[in-house]
Image (spheres, rainbow, N blue to C red):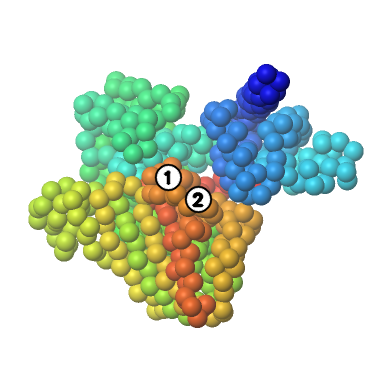
Amino acid sequence: METLNKKSSNYQAQLNDWINHEKAAIDLISAVGKLWFEKSIELILFRNQLFDRSASEIMNLHLYAKDIVKKPITVFDTVALATDILKSNVGPGRIDIGKLAYEWLQEKTNYKTSSDFINDKLKNLIGNDNPVTPKDVVLYGFGRIGRLAAREIIAQAGKGEQLRLRAIVTRGGSNEEIVKRADLLRTDSVHGPFPGTVIEDLENKALIINGHTVHMIDAKNPEDVDYTAYGINNALLIDNTGVFRDDKELSRHLAAKGIDKVLLTAPAKGDVPNVVHGINHETVDLKKQRIFSAASCTTNAIMPILYVIDKELGIQKGHIETVHSYTNDQNLLDNYHKKYRRGRSAALNMVITETGAESALKKVLPHLAGKFTANSVRVPTPNVSLAILNLNINKEVTRDEVNEIVRKYALNGSLVEQIQYAFSNELVSTDVIGNPCPSVFDSQATIISPDKKSVVLYVWYDNEYGYTRQVIRFSKHISEVRRPVYY
């Protein structure tokens, strides 16, 4: 009986501990919301979004910090610091509260109060009241990437001080078409329901998305639209159609009134810079250049890893094989297609096809051009792809050494938004749906050859959402609305 009573007591103690943590998580949710809407401060926890999360999700993120990042912090630590930030003069920015909480645990003896600690660590954000001019955004095309971009711009809008979605351009503007496009925005077979409201304003040919009025514009040609008639000026136009690829074709958007810059969400041809945010985004001249490309989803997936391995170990040559989910440019059932093999049923076949990954190196990491071969296999899954990098390197390494190199870049430095270090032996493609990083490095799959100078690396990527997050990051950069960060 005594043993049973003891077990019952332990059960109740654990339950009470969980309830206390859950209450603290709810307090953190409140602080996160106030910081976001009142001070334009976005809190993240080791790269993971905290805004619009449930209490249980937040508690799981703290377990992730403890077990994976190896930085044991509690929700009590983070909510206390978030409350201090709310009371401080810290200005707009993006702050990793996980990193901050861990540093507080390590350094608290150096400070009289946690407020002193906050003021010291975030001194570059204090008094940061330099106004940012919001950038109007036009989405040209409303397919897979266009709809995810709309969701993400709205989700990140906050007080509307960075990117503001003002219009969506499609071919066809009947009431029936607007209703259908609204329904496609509300629900998605891969990414689930839109966490907000979408209201059709058919009288004004607009959608009201979480309170944002977004004009639905019908246009056959890029130069036909007068965006200033809708109150849109100096806008960034994000072309999601993939129809226009070179400087001459994309310049047609600049002929429309109200457009300042153009960003293509596909690999560009000619002199248009192909950019992977985090790798070569700072090489473009924002004052002179007006047309940009965010490259491809595969390019955004492989370039961060190639950059890291080449910088740390040196790459002699390699082969890139992508196992890619099928896309809308394939046929659902066998039918004519201008490209070889893509006419065969995407839902039934693995299809060998070409990839532009190797040619993208010439623009993103030009010193690696000519060192790679590349190919792709389309497979019968609707989303999430896998890049297999077979690399010959200059130094002898072990599996643990390679993994630790990537882990270091995933947790610290300029690529923390681009690389996620995955550790699970059970990781499969659906686990990556909705991952905000373009590169999810599968550490458990790393292979080292017997001579220790050839490595095979596996990189997962949500070829829709992960890529779209890169597009948004680069959009903020070229629009010059990115805020200071503390990672």
Q: Quadrant of the N terminus?
A: top right
Tell which of 42 and 269 is nearer to you. Answer: 42
> Mark 1 and mark 2: span between their CA atoms?
10 Å
Q: Residue at x 35, y 74 (%)?
A: 373
> Who's the residue at 32% across and 35% down the image?
188
Q: Residue at x 43, y 28 (%)?
A: 195
> Residue 382, how many percent across, how many down?
29, 46
Q: Identify which residue, 6 or 350, lies in the foreground.
A: 6
In the rendering, at what x and y percent does residue 124 appear? 74, 47
Residue 420 picture location, percent across and down: 53, 53
At mark 2, the secondary structure is loop
- In the image, is residue 191 above or below residue 345? above
User: Mark 1 vs mark 2: which is more N-terminal?
Assistant: 2
* Disc assigned to residue 120: none
Q: Is residue 133 visible?
A: no
The answer to whether 152 is drawn above or below residue 443 in the figure is: above
Q: Could you say whether the residue bearing mark 1 is in a helix, strand or loop?
A: helix
| Place of residue 50 in the rendered image (x, y in percent of width and height, measured from the top left) | 58, 35
Of residues 387 and 302, the one drawn nearer to the viewer in this rendering? 387
What's the amino acid at mark 2? Ser
280 relative to 202 in the view: left or right: right
Q: Nearer the viewer, mark 1 or mark 2?
A: 2
Q: Which mark, residue 424?
A: 2
Query: Which amino acid is tagged 1?
Result: Asp
Q: Do the numbered discs 1 and 2 sit on residues whose CB atoms are within 8 Å?
A: yes
> Badge 2: few (under 14), some or many (20 or more) residues near its Cα, within 10 Å?
few
Residue 431 marker: 1
From this viewpoint, is residue 328 visible? Answer: yes
